[in-house]
Image (spheres, rainbow, N blue to C red):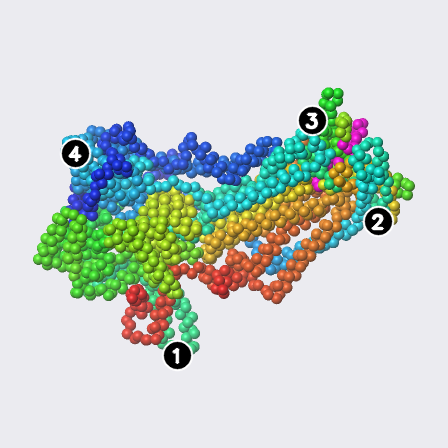
């Protein structure tokens, strides 16, 4: 057996196996560029000169280009401090705190400088530290990339391993299989004789299929290390730019300078950095662009620092508070000047204090103003920033440690990489998702096939199963009604029979499926998820029409471009692995092997297949490969023409259904009807389908065609392609349909359910993929983003417009299409049909131009789902930005590859999938999740919580500081704006530090309106975040008002109750210290009781923090009062001696606290009673009633809380049920007796067809 | 065993991960267990599943809390009002009456002149029986003892101990007395002490002088700790500009309770300060003659001066505001409670009524 070679000579055989790939391709898609831009070289934009294999010339100007090390860091050692400090103090609030801290060092400060400087240092320090750590991670990542090794030519044909960063322009490098290209290279030669290599560009555009690159003929011979000692050439090419799909250049090359010839270069010689060499043992290339000049780096963007909307809004709140601060400071300073009378007991004539100089009111006013700015600084609490940082850190910790967000299979968990965006998770409205690696796991599976009009491998699909199960329940209850009234009991019985039959069947198939899966898993065939006993284990040979069956398998085994490779994992087995241009082809080959048609060898002209004969014996047959008519996006089909051992010539063709059906001969349409039905079913399941057909060709016919084909091939010029296509068309006709296959681009676990839940929560999901349209649409169906009853708009450039390449025409074309779609929407608005939009990359490029982007976005937003295919990384980012700007909605971008980085950075929240190998997406992301499905819990549970927590927390913080700050101001009015402080300095420090900080943090970390499972059960709760109701201006103003009211109540009541008569039985009256202490006590009580009113979720932690805060105030007083008077000043023994024993003190506290909280309490009661919000009602339903919670009402509300969606699994089930009911109804009207099949199944299978009509 | 050590060492030595496909199953297992150990550990805190009390504002809660406040506040209000009612307070304003007719046009000339006769006689009537102790206060109006410049103009150190006699930095502008070119510290220094209140009162009931006890009017912590028993007034009121009262230089500050009371700066511009106590009871309709020295200058800033005689109760002096406030709040809460009770009787809202859910409401609209 040729495949069972020992591992030792494996390498050798690979070398032997070098094929002239070019021979396989009858017409190359890589034609030489038509215009060489020869005249452009040397002009601006085309100035780059590369001396190949002579990198020393690039050490000096003018040919000195940048180095190959890539830095993504924001700072370096020197710039870190100044730059990050600058970033910090760009925040207005921080600048204010800096000013205050500076002033506090002067004599103007009402309290100690330390109490102002320390928190500032903390806040700025923490932020800078965070920046530093993040940058350090980026630095490590860069270090890792920059020190990767590549083999570089150092002269005399010797290659040594060098790190990537040392690469220079002009270096010749050797890249081995499965390695990444260290920079943009010009391909010189490869391990294949004809200089072809396969490249995977997953990191660049997310495409998984391999791309063929091909070197110039003239450099083909440099395919060995030793040969490079004499290689010299010069490349003149374009300047560095970000366009991934273009490259213009010339290679000047010759044996010596005299006979140097200039060869035009194109993208097919151009290897991009970060793409991967595959299926090719090695390539040699010349470094053309390095480091920052490479296209992929040019495509990347500096990671922007993101701030959450809540925080940005908080800035506006801060501005309002600033305004308030300035206002009261102004009032205070003016008041101070106006009211500074010449009271004799102040001796103001003695000008010892500039703040009270009646002779110089301007100066005193200004000084008083500065003092007031510091004094009332409590309105703008720096501790708010500290607390938010702390809370967000803790929130992130809770997200990181959620067991439900842990992926057992990959061992990875959800990680909040930046904690500033936690609350944004609760407000997302748009999700922009990548496809490959995000929704799908980049794994193709052979799922079903339809041969001779019989479908194989089909278990009933999920949607039908879910629909029929629910129908059955409905009808069960319906039947009881019918029994009493309906005159035709037979009918109903039949209906029940039908449905139960269906369910039974589906159940069986589920069981079978499970069984089969198990056995399949055991055999471990990757890419083959097919279960049908009728085809497995040679069972098919007992079928009726074995000939067509065999032809079907032959198409599968022969019509492809793949090659077999040894199975490295199981060296002993006789199963082969395959490598091919597209992963689908691989699955076909694997499937063919499983069915007994093992494609085992390919030579230049022949293909060898081990077949199973109808006699059940195994034979190896050789097929001479006569022609291969390549797949292209316009042809949408591929054919091979082979001659079998008996000399018969066959054409095997596979392709898209409509293309093949058009080319069927009259005798070849036997199975067309059945196959069409199956195809529709497959497509609805989101499977990628392909139709197989064949044709027997007479020798004479072939000869005739072959000669015309050769003629067409010989033509040189632009019409060559067209000619070839026409000629191919001549032979690809009168085909005989064999059947169809369906391949599953496997979705990741739980993707469909997750999308379903997210849609119910009111999120819109757009799919942005670099993959081609068909694939994208397939996944759209598989993930329920698309339904078959949707009205699908396709936006793509028509071919002739595209070929003309005129911007005006293209714009008009797109505009017309958009306009037409909009007309349809207007006309069909009354119908409930949802709309979907599929946009092609080129069309998108036009549609996103400034003048028509609004039209486009308007259309896109009205569609239930939008799928953009063939989009470049830049376009992904651009769409994200425009959607964000146009809709003003919170966007979330999720992706896994380097091509998603732009979009991840651009979106409000970027999420990277951490399961895959590439780390770029994760590095750029704000959150990393192992699988798409974790998005559901991350958003609906954690997002919802975090949003509510942060909003409540900020509002409370504003409230609490207004209460505190304004009491200071009111006291000023009683002291003639002299700037005296009612409270002791330590009280002031204590307020935000100990007495009120912990309850707020517990609010911000632990608050839950409802538990996590209720969040999941009622996705509608998520919409509270989308509407932003918890941090609306209404609420902000409300809380500010509450704060102002409370501060008034506190100040006025304390003053009027405590003065002027005695407050103790001993006749003593209050002095400043007594009043200060009492007022302060009421504030501590009030704000802490207020937070207890806000919190709806009390664990022991909240209890300890809230009541402990109040308690600690008294502890502090006792401690402080016990200090000797040198330290405690006027607070000496204040509580024990003076205030504590007075009943008046306690009675005032009770009065003030109750009155302060009463307005809020009444508001709360009225809101709860008359205008309850969803979370209130759900709380009441869940916790308020004694009856069982999971009763009918609960379930009903759970159901109706879901936003009616047009996408997602449940929407499809609903549609299906509607349809089935309709069918049943019809059935009742016309009873059809002669039904052999299960009627429902039949009705299902006809469903898509009818829809199409 | 080897593999065991390997897996132990791996995290320490940062050994490269083994990626060979043909790794033996034992190592595989070890690695797998290392992988799964990444799983976040379960704790009720990290999983946010701590047992929690989730109070819901049910109608029961609403009515209960309103009623509770009402039932707590109304009695307290009544008791306070009652206590305030029992307090007898006599307020006698004398600042205008005590300026002789001839000086009414030029009060400052009268008050500034140390030679004018400041004695003034008035009568007050006791409205109700006053039980001892009866507190004698003076009440000043529009006097900003809480002015920042005033409040900080004192030296606690100097007051506390004789050792810090010259610690007068904070006392500007009343810190030093220029004694023949040599600035010596003033004790007690500062504006507060300097502006000491110096009106004096003598009360005569039926030709018998009522004894006003001026001891025990200051806080214990002041007389014991904050004002030193070895600190004697020095150079006080010696500057040209004389503020208020003078002090007896032979009595230590800790005994000068008038000063101590004055130095406890009042919080508000209208304030009372204890002058002394009367330990005999006053009967209703008693007429008391007040003989006072009207020394203190409140005229320059339009302040009023009042003499206050008051008894106390457990809430202190007369204070109707407190009781009224309590009663008002209690009344409001009672009103709210009744309203809600009526509401729930006539139009009960079932708890957790799903028709209030936003999606159901939308459907109705």
> In the rendered image, which quarter is residue B214 located in?
top right
In the figure, is residue A1045 to the left or right of A1?
right
Q: Answer with mark 3 or mark 2, whichever residue precedes in sequence.
A: 2
Residue B264 is a magenta residue: yes
Badge 3 and badge 1 both on one subunit = no
For the residues bearing labels 3 and 4, Cβ distance under 8 angstroms: no
* Residue placed under numbered mark 2 in the picture: B127
| Front residue of this view, candidates B214 and A678 | B214
Disc 3, disc 2: CB below 8 Å? Answer: no
- For the residues beneath circles 4 and 1, the answer to whether they share a chain is yes
Q: Nearer the viewer, residue A615 or B150?
A: B150
Q: Is residue A580 left or right of residue B103?
A: left
Pointer 3 and pointer 2 on the same chain: yes
The residue carrying mark 4 is A260
Q: What separation in Å lies between label 1 and label 2 (alpha carbons)?
A: 101 Å
Residue farthest left in this picture: A700
Distance, label 4 to label 1, CA atoms, is: 96 Å
State which quadrant residue A1140 falls in.
top right
């Amino acid at each position: 057996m040729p495949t069972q070679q020992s591992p030792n000579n494996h390498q050798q055989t690979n070398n032997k196996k070098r094929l002239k790939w070019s021979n396989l391709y009858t017409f190359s898609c890589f034609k030489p560029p038509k215009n060489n831009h020869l005249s452009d070289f040397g002009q601006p934009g085309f100035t780059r000169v590369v001396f190949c294999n002579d990198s020393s010339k690039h050490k000096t100007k003018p040919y000195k280009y940048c180095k190959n090390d890539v830095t993504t860091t924001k700072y370096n050692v020197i710039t870190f401090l100044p730059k990050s400090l600058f970033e910090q103090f760009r925040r207005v609030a921080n600048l204010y705190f800096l000013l205050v801290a500076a002033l506090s060092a002067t004599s103007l400060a009402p309290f100690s400088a330390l109490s102002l400087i320390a928190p500032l240092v903390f806040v700025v320090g923490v932020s800078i530290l965070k920046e530093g750590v993040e940058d350090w991670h980026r630095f490590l990542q860069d270090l890792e990339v920059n020190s990767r090794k590549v083999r570089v030519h150092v002269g005399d044909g010797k290659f040594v391993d060098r790190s990537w960063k040392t690469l220079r322009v002009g270096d010749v490098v050797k890249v081995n299989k499965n390695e990444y290209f260290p920079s943009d290279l010009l391909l010189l030669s490869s391990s294949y004789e004809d200089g072809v290599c396969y490249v995977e560009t997953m990191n660049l555009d997310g495409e998984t299929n391999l791309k063929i690159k091909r070197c110039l003929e003239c450099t083909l011979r440099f395919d060995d290390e030793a040969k490079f000692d004499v290689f010299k050439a010069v490349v003149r090419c374009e300047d560095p730019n970000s366009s991934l799909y273009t490259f213009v250049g010339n290679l000047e090359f010759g044996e010596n300078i005299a006979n140097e010839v200039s060869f035009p270069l194109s993208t097919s010689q151009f290897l991009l950095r970060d793409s991967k060499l595959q299926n090719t043992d090695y390539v040699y290339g010349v470094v053309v662009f390095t480091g920052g000049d490479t296209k992929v780096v040019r495509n990347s963007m500096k990671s922007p620092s993101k701030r959450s909307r809540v925080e940005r809004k908080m800035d506006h709140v801060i501005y309002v508070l600033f305004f308030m601060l300035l206002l009261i400071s102004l009032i205070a300073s003016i008041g101070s000047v106006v009211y500074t009378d010449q009271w004799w007991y102040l001796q103001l004539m003695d000008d010892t204090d500039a703040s009270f100089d009646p002779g110089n009111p301007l100066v005193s006013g200004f000084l008083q103003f500065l003092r007031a700015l510091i004094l009332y600084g409590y309105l703008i609490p720096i501790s708010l920033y500290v607390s938010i940082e702390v809370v967000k850190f803790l929130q992130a910790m809770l997200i990181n440690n959620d067991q439900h967000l842990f992926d057992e299979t990959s061992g990875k968990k959800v990680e909040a990489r930046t904690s500033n965006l936690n609350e944004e998770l609760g407000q997302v409205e748009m999700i922009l998702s990548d496809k490959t690696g995000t929704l799908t796991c980049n794994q193709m599976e052979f799922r079903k096939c339809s041969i001779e009009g019989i479908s194989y491998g089909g278990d009933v699909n999920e949607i039908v199963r879910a629909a029929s199960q629910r129908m059955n329940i409905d009808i069960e209850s319906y039947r009881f009604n019918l029994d009493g009234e309906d005159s035709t009991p037979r009918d109903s019985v039949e209906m029940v029979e039908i449905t139960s039959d269906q369910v039974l069947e589906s159940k069986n198939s589920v069981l079978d499926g499970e069984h089969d899966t198990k056995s399949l898993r055991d055999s471990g065939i990757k890419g083959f998820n097919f279960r049908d006993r009728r085809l497995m284990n040679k069972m098919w040979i007992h079928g009726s029409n074995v000939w067509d069956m065999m032809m079907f398998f032959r198409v599968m085994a022969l019509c492809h471009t793949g090659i077999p490779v040894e199975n490295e994992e199981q060296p002993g087995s006789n199963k082969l692995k395959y490598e091919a241009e597209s992963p689908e082809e691989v699955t076909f080959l694997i499937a063919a092997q499983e069915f007994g048609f093992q494609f085992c060898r390919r030579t230049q002209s022949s293909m060898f297949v081990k077949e199973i004969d109808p006699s059940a014996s195994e034979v190896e047959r050789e097929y001479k490969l006569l022609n291969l008519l390549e797949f292209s996006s316009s042809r949408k089909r591929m054919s091979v023409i082979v001659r079998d051992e008996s000399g018969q010539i066959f054409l095997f063709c596979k392709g898209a259904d409509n293309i093949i059906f058009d080319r069927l001969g009259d005798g070849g349409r036997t199975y067309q009807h059945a196959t069409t039905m199956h195809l529709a079913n497959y497509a609805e399941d989101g499977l990628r389908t392909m139709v197989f057909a064949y044709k027997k060709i007479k020798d004479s016919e072939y000869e005739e065609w072959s000669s015309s084909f050769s003629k067409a091939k010989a033509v040189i010029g632009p019409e060559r392609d067209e000619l070839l296509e026409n000629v191919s068309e001549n032979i690809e006709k009168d085909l005989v349909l064999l059947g169809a296959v369906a391949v599953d681009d496997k979705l990741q676990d739980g993707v469909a359910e997750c999308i379903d839940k997210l849609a119910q929560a009111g999120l819109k999901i757009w799919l942005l993929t670099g993959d081609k349209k068909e694939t994208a649409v397939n996944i759209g169906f598989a993930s329920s983003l698309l339904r078959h009853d949707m009205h699908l708009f396709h936006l793509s450039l028509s071919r002739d417009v595209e070929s003309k390449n005129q911007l005006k025409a293209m714009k008009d074309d797109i505009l017309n299409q958009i306009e037409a779609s909009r007309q349809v929407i207007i006309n069909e608005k009354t119908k409930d049909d949802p709309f979907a939009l599929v946009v092609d990359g080129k069309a998108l490029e036009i549609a996103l131009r400034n003048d028509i982007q609004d039209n486009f976005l308007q259309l896109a937003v009205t569609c239930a789902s939008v799928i953009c295919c063939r989009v470049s990384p830049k376009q992904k980012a651009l769409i994200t930005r425009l959607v964000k700007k146009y809709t003003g909605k919170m966007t979330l971008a999720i992706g896994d590859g380097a091509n998603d980085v732009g979009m991840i950075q651009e979106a409000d929240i970027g999420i990277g999938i951490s399961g895959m190998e590439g780390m770029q997406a994760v590095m750029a992301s704000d959150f990393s999740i192992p699988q798409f499905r974790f998005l559901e819990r991350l958003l609906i549970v954690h997002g919802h919580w975090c949003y509510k927590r942060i909003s409540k927390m900020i509002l409370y913080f504003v409230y609490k500081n207004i209460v505190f700050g304004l009491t200071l101001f009111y006291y000023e009015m009683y002291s003639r704006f002299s700037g005296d402080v009612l409270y002791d300095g330590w009280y002031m420090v204590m307020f935000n530090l100990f007495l009120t900080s912990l309850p707020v943090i517990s609010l911000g970390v632990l608050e839950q309106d409802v538990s996590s499972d209720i969040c999941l059960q009622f996705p509608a709760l998520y919409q509270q975040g989308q509407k932003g109701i918890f941090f609306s201006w209404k609420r902000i103003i409300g809380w500010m008002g509450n704060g102002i009211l409370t501060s008034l109540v506190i100040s006025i009541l304390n003053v009027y109750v405590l003065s002027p008569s005695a407050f103790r039985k001993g006749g003593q009256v209050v002095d400043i210290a007594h009043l200060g202490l009492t007022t302060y006590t009421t504030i501590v009580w009030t704000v802490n009781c207020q937070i207890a009113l806000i919190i709806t979720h009390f664990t022991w932690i909240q209890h300890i923090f809230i009541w402990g805060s109040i308690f600690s105030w008294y502890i502090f007083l006792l401690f402080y009062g016990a200090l000797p008077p040198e330290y405690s000043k006027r607070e000496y023994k204040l509580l024990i001696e003076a205030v504590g024993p007075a009943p008046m003190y306690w009675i005032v506290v009770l009065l003030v606290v109750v009155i302060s909280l009463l307005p809020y309490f009444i508001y709360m009661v009225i809101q709860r009673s008359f205008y309850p919000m969803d979370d209130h009602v759900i709380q009441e339903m869940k916790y308020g009633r004694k009856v069982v919670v999971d009763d009918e009402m609960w379930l009903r509300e759970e159901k109706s809380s879901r936003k009616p969606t047009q996408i997602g699994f449940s929407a499809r089930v609903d549609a299906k049920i509607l349809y089935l009911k309709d069918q049943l109804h019809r059935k009742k009207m016309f009873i059809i007796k002669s039904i052999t099949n299960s009627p429902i199944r039949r009705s299902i299978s006809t469903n898509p067809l009818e829809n199409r009509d | 065993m080897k593999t065991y050590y390997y897996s132990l060492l791996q995290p320490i030595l940062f050994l490269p991960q083994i990626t060979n496909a043909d790794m033996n199953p034992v190592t595989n297992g070890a690695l797998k267990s290392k992988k799964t150990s990444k799983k976040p550990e379960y704790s009720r805190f990290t999983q946010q599943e701590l047992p929690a009390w989730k109070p819901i504002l049910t109608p029961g809660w609403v009515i209960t809390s309103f009623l509770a406040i009402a039932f707590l506040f109304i009695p307290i209000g009544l008791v306070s009002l009652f206590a305030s009612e029992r307090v007898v307070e006599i307020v006698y304003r004398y600042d205008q009456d005590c300026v002789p007719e001839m000086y009414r046009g030029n009060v400052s000339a009268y008050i500034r002149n140390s030679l004018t006769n400041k004695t003034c006689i008035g009568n007050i009537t006791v409205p109700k029986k006053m039980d001892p102790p009866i507190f004698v206060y003076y009440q000043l109006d529009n006097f900003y003892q809480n002015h920042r410049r005033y409040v900080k103009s004192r030296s606690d150190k100097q007051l506390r101990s004789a050792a810090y006699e010259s610690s007068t930095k904070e006392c500007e502008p009343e810190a030093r007395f220029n004694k023949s070119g040599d600035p010596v510290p003033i004790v007690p220094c500062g504006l507060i002490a300097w502006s000491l209140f110096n009106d004096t009162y003598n009360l005569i009931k039926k030709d018998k002088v009522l004894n006003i006890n001026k001891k025990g009017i200051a806080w214990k912590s002041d007389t014991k700790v904050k004002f030193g028993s070895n600190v004697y007034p020095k150079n006080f009121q010696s500057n040209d500009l004389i503020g208020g009262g003078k002090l007896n230089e032979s009595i230590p500050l800790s005994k000068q309770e008038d000063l101590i009371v004055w130095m406890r700066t009042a919080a508000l511009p209208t304030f009372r300060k204890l002058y002394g106590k009367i330990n005999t009871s006053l009967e209703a309709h008693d007429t008391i003659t007040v003989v006072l020295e009207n020394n203190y200058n409140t005229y320059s800033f339009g302040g009023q001066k009042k003499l206050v005689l008051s008894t106390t109760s457990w809430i202190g002096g007369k204070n109707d505001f407190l009781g009224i406030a309590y009663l008002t709040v209690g009344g409001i809460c009672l009103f709210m409670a009744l309203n809600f009770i009526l509401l729930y009787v006539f139009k009960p809202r079932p708890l957790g009524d799903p028709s209030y859910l936003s999606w159901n409401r939308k459907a109705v609209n």
